Image (cartoon, rainbow, N blue to C red):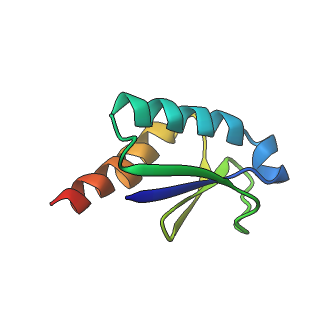
Amino acid sequence: MLIIQICVGSSCHLKGSQEIVALLQESIAEHGLEDEVVLSGSFCIGKCNRIGVTVQVNDDIHVGITRENFKEFFNEHILARIAAEGK
């Protein structure tokens, strides 16, 4: 089970956290991962970045998540991790 926390603090909110939440919800549903992932919001994870949103996957923090790099992030840090845990 992956716990994904999206920063919804003021800085990330202004940089599009609501869009990243929507992309995560769509991608989780598209891949049928509703039973594999817990999605939640978090106020300031403390790793503010100039570009994009901060997302924490379990204990790993990823900064700079944008619409443009979302697919790569999702494939590398969510799909690959779920596949590895399933082995």
Asked whether 6 or 65 is in front, the reply is 6
Q: Give the quadrant of residue 7.
A: bottom right
The answer to which of 37 and 16 lies nearer the viewer is 37
**Residue at horizontal 50 percent and vertical 71 percent from the top:** 59
Name the side, left or right, on which 82 lies relative to 56: left
- Residue at image x 42%, y 37%? 28
| 46 displayed left or right of 32 | right
The percent coordinates of residue 33 (x first, y second) are 35, 41
Tell me which residue sits at (49%, 52%) in the image: 38
> Residue 21: where, in percent of width, then height?
61, 39
Q: Position of residue 2 (x, y in %)?
A: 42, 58
Left/right of residue 50 with respect to residue 40 in the rendered view: right
Q: Residue at x 60, y 41 (%)?
A: 66
Res. 32 image quadrant: top left
| Quadrant of the snapshot with the N terminus | bottom left
Q: How many marks?
A: 0
- Image coords of residue 9 (percent x, y): 79, 54
> Residue most toward the right?
10
Q: Is residue 20 above or below residue 8?
A: above
4, above or below 66, in the image: below
* Residue 8 horizontal side relative to residue 19, left or right: right
Image quarter for residue 15?
Answer: top right
Q: Is residue 28 above or below residue 10?
A: above
Image quadrant occupied by the C terminus: bottom left
Name the outermost residue toward the left: 87
